[in-house]
Image (cartoon, rainbow, N blue to C red):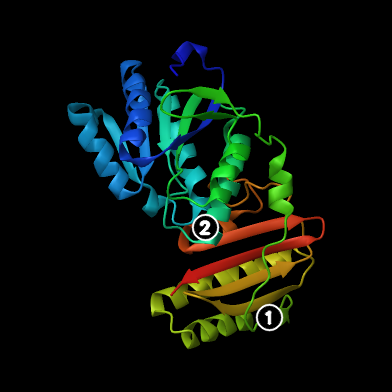
């Protein structure tokens, strides 16, 4: 399974399938220690139980590894690429190569989160394929994850491995981003409150969303976040979506949902996932919403754009 540093020509994105803690460590420890032996910066983003397990197994080597709580940075998977991009830029500027471990699709996530993890994994390839050489290993728990999530990992990673083998993935869908990004989101199953807005209606739309959020029993902090998200997304629809848009609000088990739709077309699926450059004319609103909200689902095609914001109750 070893791949020497001078053999890496670009971004290598690999899914590691494991069963149980021993198999997890059997796949991860050689990868991490090889990076340390090659004087690479090794960054591990895992949920806390996995971080503790790996830290204990590494012993003294753990001091040389950077550990990040995936549940914290990746509660909304749209935030993860920005973390990797900042890490890569920092260490590349210092003349260091990095290798990462990231497990966004960990057991216990909700179906909507798994959907965003799959899109995130696809977008990693677009974000980093043309940049500096580095490796990212993404563990998948075959015992505890839904089979659809395991199958999705084969489509989103050019390489697949276990603790004893490493192969190219014959199921990898290099052109899958456009399909996934343009696919409509599942329709709501409960009663929906829906309205339209135009250029002069942004403040009223913001107030309406805040009122709905309070009626749903959300905390005042959650209400304030949704107010800000509503303002940013309604403004985006006015500026980039044909001057008007639609807002929809409904409840799902354990969640309040607010969705903005318009006739615009977001042509870059990475919009809102990294900090836009200062000279950029757009993208800051979606980036801010991604940073603040529990879960954000952005889909767009020539038929229009939808941004769904989910707040866990």
Assign a secondary structure to mark 2: helix
* Residue linked to disc 2: 113
**Number of marks present in the image shown:** 2
Image coordinates of residue 209 in percent, x first then y, are 57, 80
Q: Nearer the viewer, mark 2 or mark 1?
A: 2
Image coordinates of residue 309 in percent, x first then y, are 56, 67
- The numbered disc on residue 201 is 1
Q: CA distance from mark 2 to mark 1?
A: 31 Å
Q: Residues within 10 Å of mark 1 (few under 14, many from 20)?
A: some
> Earlier along the polypeptide chain: callout 2 or callout 1?
2
Q: Residue furthest right?
A: 302
154 versus 77 height, above or below: above
Residue 62 visible: yes
Image coordinates of residue 183 in percent, x first then y, are 72, 55
Residue 132 visible: no
255 versus 195 height, above or below: above
264 versus 277 height, above or below: below
27 or 47, nearer to the observer = 27
110 or 302, nearer to the observer = 110
State which quadrant residue 230 falls in.
bottom right
- The numbered disc on residue 279 is none
Image coordinates of residue 114 in percent, x first then y, are 53, 54
99 or 87, nearer to the observer = 99
Q: Residue at x 43, y 84 (%)?
A: 217
Q: Residue at x 48, y 25 (%)?
A: 134
């Amino acid at each position: 399974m070893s791949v020497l540093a001078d053999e890496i020509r670009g971004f290598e994105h690999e899914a590691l399938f494991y069963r149980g803690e021993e198999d997890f460590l059997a796949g991860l420890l050689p990868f991490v220690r090889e990076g340390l032996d090659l004087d690479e910066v090794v960054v591990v983003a895992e949920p806390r139980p996995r971080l503790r397990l790996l830290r204990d197994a590494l012993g003294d080597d753990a001091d040389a590894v950077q550990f990040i709580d995936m549940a914290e940075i990746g509660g909304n998977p749209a935030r993860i690429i920005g973390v990797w991009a900042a890490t890569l830029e920092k260490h590349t500027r210092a003349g260091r190569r990095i290798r990462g471990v990231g497990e966004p699709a960990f057991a216990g996530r909700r179906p909507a989160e798994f959907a965003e993890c799959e899109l995130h994994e696809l977008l990693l390839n677009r974000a980093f394929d043309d940049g500096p050489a580095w490796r990212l290993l993404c563990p998948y728990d075959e015992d505890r994850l839904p089979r659809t999530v395991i199958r999705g990992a084969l489509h989103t990673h050019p390489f697949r491995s276990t603790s004893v083998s490493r192969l190219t993935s014959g199921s990898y869908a290099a052109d899958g981003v456009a399909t996934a990004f343009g696919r409509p989101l599942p329709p709501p199953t409960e009663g929906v409150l829906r309205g339209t807005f135009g250029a002069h209606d942004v403040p009223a739309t913001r107030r309406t969303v805040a009122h709905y959020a309070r009626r749903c029993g959300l905390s005042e902090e959650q209400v304030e976040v949704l107010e800000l998200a509503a303002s940013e997304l309604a403004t985006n629809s006015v500026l980039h979506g044909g001057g008007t848009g639609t807002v929809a609000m409904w409840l799902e088990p354990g969640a309040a949902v607010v969705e903005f739709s318009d006739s615009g077309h977001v042509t870059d699926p990475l919009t809102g996932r990294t900090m836009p450059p200062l000279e950029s004319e757009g993208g800051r609103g979606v980036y801010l919403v991604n940073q603040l909200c529990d879960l954000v689902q952005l889909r767009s095609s020539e038929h229009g754009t939808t941004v769904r914001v989910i707040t866990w109750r």
